[in-house]
Image (cartoon, grey):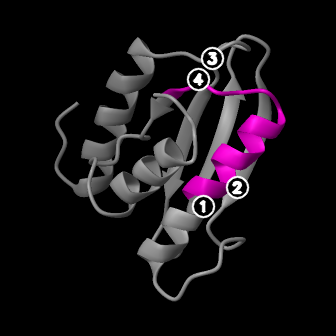
């Protein structure tokens, strides 16, 4: 598959990442989806195909998308800790590790998730 546009390139990156990582009950996958308006994150146990916790940046308070991403990172860490989850596998969803994705990951790490 030859990638000619942004969406195809992200899809190729995502498939390559998902071929290498998988979540379990002991170490779930922290999966991200980013749109122009929001970031959605889920803690997923791939072995039983269940979502353990989720958060959307629409739930977070903040004036800018970056501030909402930071708050969402803190929220997912808090919800994970409530379920007894400390270690996760980070799935950036094929998005480049920069901007709001990086801010989300950094804030989740600061709040206590290990990845």
Q: What span is in magenta? A: 73-89
Write down the residue under mark 3.
Answer: 27
Q: Report how far apart the C-alphas of labels 2 and 4 lie in the structure.
A: 17 Å
Q: Earlier in the sequence, mark 3 or mark 2?
A: 3
Say above or below: 59 vs 105.
Answer: below
Q: Residues within 10 Å of mark 4 (few under 14, many from 20)?
A: some
Tags 1 and 2 touching, CB below 8 Å: yes
User: Residue 3 at what x, y percent from top left?
Assistant: 19, 42
Q: Residue furthest bottom?
A: 63
Q: Earlier in the sequence, mark 3 or mark 4?
A: 3
Instruction: Tell me: 70 left or right of 20.
Output: right
Q: Residue at x 40, y 49 (%)?
A: 106
Q: Residues within 10 Å of mark 1 (few under 14, many from 20)?
A: many
User: Residue 7 at what x, y percent from top left?
Assistant: 32, 53
Q: Residue at x 64, y 79 (%)?
A: 61
Q: Report how far apart the C-alphas of labels 1 and 2 lie in the structure.
A: 7 Å
Q: Residue at x 72, y 48 (%)?
A: 78
Write down the residue under mark 2.
Answer: 55
Write down the residue under mark 1.
Answer: 72
State the SS at label 1.
Answer: helix
- In magenta stretch: residue 26: no
Question: Looking at the image, which is closer to me, 109 or 48?
Answer: 109
- In magenta stretch: residue 79: yes
């Amino acid at each position: 598959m030859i990638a000619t546009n942004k969406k195809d390139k992200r899809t190729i990156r995502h498939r390559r990442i998902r071929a290498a990582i998988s979540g379990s009950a002991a170490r779930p996958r922290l999966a991200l989806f980013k749109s122009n308006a929001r970031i959605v994150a889920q803690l997923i146990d791939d072995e039983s195909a269940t979502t353990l916790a989720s958060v959307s940046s629409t739930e977070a308070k903040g004036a800018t998308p970056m501030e909402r991403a930071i708050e969402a990172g803190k929220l997912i860490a808090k919800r994970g800790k409530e379920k007894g989850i400390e270690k996760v596998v980070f799935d950036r969803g094929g998005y480049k590790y920069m901007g709001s994705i990086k801010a989300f990951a950094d804030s989740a790490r600061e709040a206590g998730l290990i990845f």
